[in-house]
Amino acid sequence: MLVLFETPAGFALFKVLDEGKLSKVEDLWKEFSTSDAARKVVTLKAFSKFENITEALAATTLLIDSKPSKGLRKFLHAHCEGETLAVADTKLGKAIQDKLKIECVHNNAVMELMRGVRHQLMELIAGLGPQDLAPMSLGLSHSMSRHKLKFSPDKVDIMLIQAIGNMDDLDKELNISAMRLREWYGWHFPELAKILQDNILYAKTVKMMRDRTNAAKLDFSEIMSEELEIQFKEAAMISMGTEVCELDLNMIVEQCDQVISLAKLRAELYDYLKSRMNAVAPNLTALVGELVGARLIAHAGSLINLAKQPGSTTQILGAEKALFRALKQKHATPKFGLIYHASLIGQASAKHKGKISRSLAAKTALAVRCDAFGDDQDNSIGLENRAKLELRLMNLEGKELGRSAGSAKGKPKMELYNKDRKKGAGALITPAKTYNPSADSVIGQKEPMTPIKVQIGVAGKEAPVANEEKKEKKTNKREKKADAEETGLQNDAFGCAEPVSRDAEIKLRKKKMKQHAVTEDVELQSGGVKANVKKNKKREHPGHDEETEKRGKKKE
């Protein structure tokens, strides 16, 4: 068995003398404790030296990608006929086996054998000393670093990351300088800060005017509107600020120059960033804009790293601290991070921002992958996804939540809301009942002693017999109670302790029934009782009727 070992000086092939020792992997390191012991295990069979640094760089670059170089293929073809080759990389062994038909082996014993060879490399290869190997390793490592930096697939992202970082620093510095200028010049002209809200316009005005007494003599039409100029000049005439000397004004003007130069540099940097973003990530720029896209790339580290992230990670990218705090405290997790500043989320209402941010993050993940790994460098996918998101936003704002964006062709059909229409059916439900004035009660009208309810059906027929029987039972119970009370009153009046006989009770009951019948006829004739009464209407004031009967009997 042969062992392929790569060095900065070239490729080496070692012949394994005793393959039986490879069976004891745990004790294999003892065989390489000394150079003499190592020579009993392996011996150098052939060595292919690199001619120059270019050949070494090309061969090492291919080995990193698990591919054999042309020189390595020739070297193996010449010395490995009918032999088994031990390699340190599984993918490299598979590539050699496919191209050269050489059987390759990779296991734990081979890896331990590689460690022993590396430990005794200087002794096993004659003529290769530390003074030669160290410069070769250093030169090859430097060449590899330059090669990776030059041919890196994400090398363009570095410029974007530096540009957006510089823009953020410029914004902070510009705000600090403008705030200092307003505070400084405010001692001389405090009213100007409220009139001119823009920092650049404020700096240009102060630079042109210097002292506030010069405001009436100068023309500011080039930098501000006519109405603002009139308001500004009137305030300068009645200003309550203090007087400043010429030396102070010179320093204030220098501060104005600094603010103006920072603003100009920021504008140029934004134009550069806009052009680079359209060239590097056109689909991402079409979806979220130049600034948000550049911040996402900078936060992820590169365009490739951002393309590897799923949509859920892209959605909360930049809000990691809030996410972990919410998970720790078991609160609601954040719905958006840096993507919140995109124009589509800004157009959505507060209750729809979460849905739009989730949809935008999913489309952004697709757009970034197209920019990073796609061959076409146009923004057609980004524009198409943005149109779908805008349609979804319109549907959400229009209360049409059932139809997703892009699922139906043409314009969405808007139907008027009808509270009487059933869901999923064309029929209408029964309309609401109208107001019934006959159910009203009139104040001051005397109520009958025993109200009689007449129930009439839908078509004018009489109520069922069962309802009439229930009414008769209630009436009989009421009459029995009234008779018992009347009998008790009579016994108390005559001083009798014994109750009235059974015959007398029957006579009194018949007399009462006749009186009720007469009362009903009189009330029906006079129109006191209305015939059209609802079936479900309850008996009105039963307790009041009983009390009225008691009062009448007491008077008697």
Image: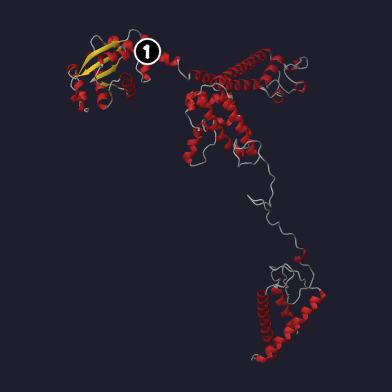
Is 471 on the left or on the right of 71, as rendered? right
Q: 382 or 322: which is nearer to us?
A: 382
- In the rendered view, tell whether residue 501 sits above or below residue 104: below
Is 197 on the left or on the right of 237, as rendered? left
Colour theme: secondary structure
- In the rendered view, tell whether residue 529 sits above or below residue 216: below
- In the rendered view, tell whether residue 544 sits above or below residue 174: below
In which quadrant of the rendered view does residue 246 lie?
top right
Is 521 on the left or on the right of 247, as rendered? right
Report x, y in % for residue 321.
49, 33
Residue 500 shows in the view: no
Report x, y in % for residue 351.
61, 40
Q: Residue furthest top?
A: 51
Residue pictured at 53% horizontal, 37% vertical: 334
Q: Secondary structure at mark 1?
A: helix
Q: 301 or 23: which is nearer to us?
A: 23
| Quadrant in the picture for the C terminus | bottom right
Is 458 on the left or on the right of 334, as rendered? right
Report x, y in % for residue 508.
71, 87
In which quadrant of the rendered view does residue 504 lie?
bottom right
Residue 51 shows in the view: yes
Reading the image, the residue beneath label 1 is 57
- How many residues crowd around disc 1 within 10 Å: few (fewer than 14), some, or many (20 or more)? many
Q: Residue furthest right?
A: 526
Instruction: Kindly identify the amino acid type of the residue bearing the numbered disc 1.
Output: Leu
- In the rendered view, tell whether residue 323 sits above or below residue 416: above
In which quadrant of the rendered view does residue 124 lie?
top left
| Quadrant in the picture for the N terminus | top left
Q: 106 or 100: which is nearer to us?
A: 100
Report x, y in % for residue 87.
29, 21
